[in-house]
Amino acid sequence: MSPTQNPSPEGGMATEVELLSQALLREYMHKKGYKATWARYDDEEPRTAQTISSRKQMASLLGLTTEQSAGKYKTFMEMIVEARLQTYASQQTAGEHLATEQASTTEKEKKLKKKAKTAEGTTGKKKKAAKTEPVSPLAVDDTEEPPLAVQATPPAAAPAPALDPVRKGTVRAVPEKSSWGLSDLSLSASDDEAPADGHWRKDAAAAQAPAASNGPAPATDLVESLVEDLDGETEVKKSQAQSPAASHVAAPMVSGTALGTEVGRQIKRMLFGDRPWRTSWVQQGFFWSSEVSYGLVQREGGPCGPLAVVQAYLLKDLLFDAPGTGAVDVPTPRLEEALASALAAILWTIATHGPWPKSPTVFLATVPGGQPPTGANFKQSCSLEDFRVLSFTSEKAVRAYILANSLQFTAEKGNGLLLFLTSTFLTKVGSVRNPDWTLLTREMDSPQQSFIVEHGYSSQELVNLLIHGHAVSNVFDGTTELSGGEGPGMALKGVAERAKIGYLSLHEHYDYLRVGENLKSPHLPLWVVCSESHFTVLFAKQRQAIQGVKFDLHYYDQLGMQDEEIRLTVDTSGQMTPSVQDGDELTPPIDQVIRTKWKGATINWNDTDPLL
């Protein structure tokens, strides 16, 4: 959610209360350093696109201010409790004052009544005397009329902090539960999920690719390597690839072979284990934000891991690989080229670390007939076993095919992510007819674990597979041997070589793990960031930028609905302020992640509200 946005009426007051309550809890636990409690809470209440992570937005909704005296922060929960206690104390004081006034008034009334009776008796005697004595013309009746008793009115109680009226246009509605009731292999949602409505996110229609035409791709370039039909019936040694200018024209579809029931079931087990399909993974394509042009958009919580890795590789192409690099604010055709390059680069990295590194082959999953899948209609008419698989023996050929058939991957509610993940598994095991799944699972510490774990989160193994081609469970360098006492020991596999794309983790700040230099210092200044069970991207726009004492990094969260680019200025001169060292300030987790690489650095958010 953007720092400047507020919940929309679709969610209703109950949703707003729930989201703000969650934000208050997270902010308080973060400030107090309850690391284990915070991590457990994130497990039980996973973050979503609706999650409020901006103090500025919280302040706006609660009618409070983020300004504090002496440079110290109070959490909003503390501020609300303090305000309520002050209000209660003032009410108590007012009540005591009222009771005192009422007691005083009652005593005065008693005295006045007694005085009135005394005066009445005196008057009666005077009346009797008047019968025998004349009344002096100067005589004055000194009786006093008792005043009316004044009822004290208690002061009005100060109103408790209240939520602002619900504003339009930011929080996505909570989906109603739905069951698609399809077969095990069909791409159906589990009973506790439902597809998101279109209004859940900002309109990204401007970033979508135009509709594909039926004409053939222009013969402007030749794919230099083999595209094989896996049924063995067709072999195309020089298929036409399309030019960037015509990237929306569908290329001729090579038939390939069906994935098949057994392979489809195994891939489903590899992804989800015994859990049902999740719409957050099944209905997710690679499409772009309408606000931050280069940013991919995550529709629901869950698939942040692969999306963050693809985002990093997409930025790699925009900033460092293609001619005229350095620009990220580019039109959609250029973004589609960068996406095709990113997907091809990841698959080729996996292929070169597969069973035949000297003759790598990419196995690419596609949809029947080359038509882009679209949400529920696709789910009801097709299943994973119906995916068609093609093989490519060069990265350039993979890129050309994806670019020519980009709508298969970029349809917003399509199955682009699932096609890509299916391709990564098939490429890793090196076959679609007789796949040896141990080629994938033998790299993991726990071979029985699925790649999508509890709450629909990405596993570390999946993120590692996409970053550097190995599905290892750890992020340290090399291999660590664990002694087994009298029995055999166990080898924990880490990262064998310096990666192109890096990785940083908040868990290192908490001393839960150590990220090795192979990931912490990659070839390019691009990092996938793990913070609070969520994967995002941190990057520099120049290759040599981070060599200085002071430099800029950029941060992008594909689930955060950013409405602007976030630029962070990192100062590594070691002059970190005492308040930050002492933990007095509410330090953003991203700052703590950055300091795992640049010790003692100060981070300036440049007038952007820091994200919690």
Image: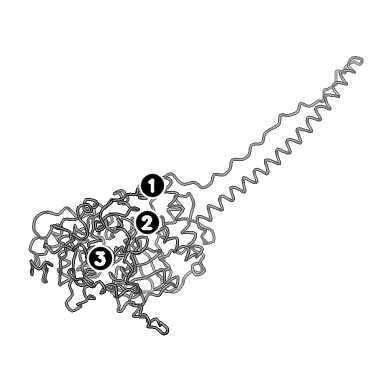
Do the numbered discs 3 and 1 sit on residues whose CB atoms are within 8 Å? no
* Quadrant in the picture for the C terminus: bottom left
Q: Which mark is residue 266?
A: 3
Amino acid at circle 2: Thr
Element under disc 2: loop
Q: CA distance from mark 2 to mark 1?
A: 14 Å
Q: CA distance from mark 2 to mark 3?
A: 29 Å
Element under disc 3: helix
Do the numbered discs 2 and 3 sit on residues whose CB atoms are within 8 Å? no
Residue 573 x, y percent position in the rendering: 43, 74
Closer to us: 113 or 445: 445
Residue 380 x, y percent position in the rendering: 22, 52
Q: CA distance from mark 3 to mark 1?
A: 38 Å
* Of pointers 2 and 3, the one earlier in the residue sequence: 2
Judge left or right: residue 255 versus residue 3: left
Instruction: Please rate how many residues cluster around mark 3, counting C-alpha atoms within 10 Å: few if below 14, some from 14 to 19, many from 20.
Output: some
Q: How many marks do you count on the picture? A: 3
Q: Is residue 326 visible?
A: no
Residue position for label 2: 48
Element under disc 1: helix
Work out whether 490 lies above or below 68. Answer: below
Residue position for label 1: 11
Tag in front: 3 or 1: 3
Residue 599 x, y percent position in the rendering: 43, 74
Q: Quadrant of residue 399?
A: bottom left
Instruction: Please rate how many residues cluster around mark 2, counting C-alpha atoms within 10 Å: few if below 14, some from 14 to 19, many from 20.
Output: some
Do the numbered discs 2 and 1 sit on residues whose CB atoms are within 8 Å? no
* Of pointers 2 and 1, the one earlier in the residue sequence: 1
Amino acid at circle 1: Gly
* Quadrant in the picture for the N terminus: bottom left
Q: Is residue 508 visible?
A: yes
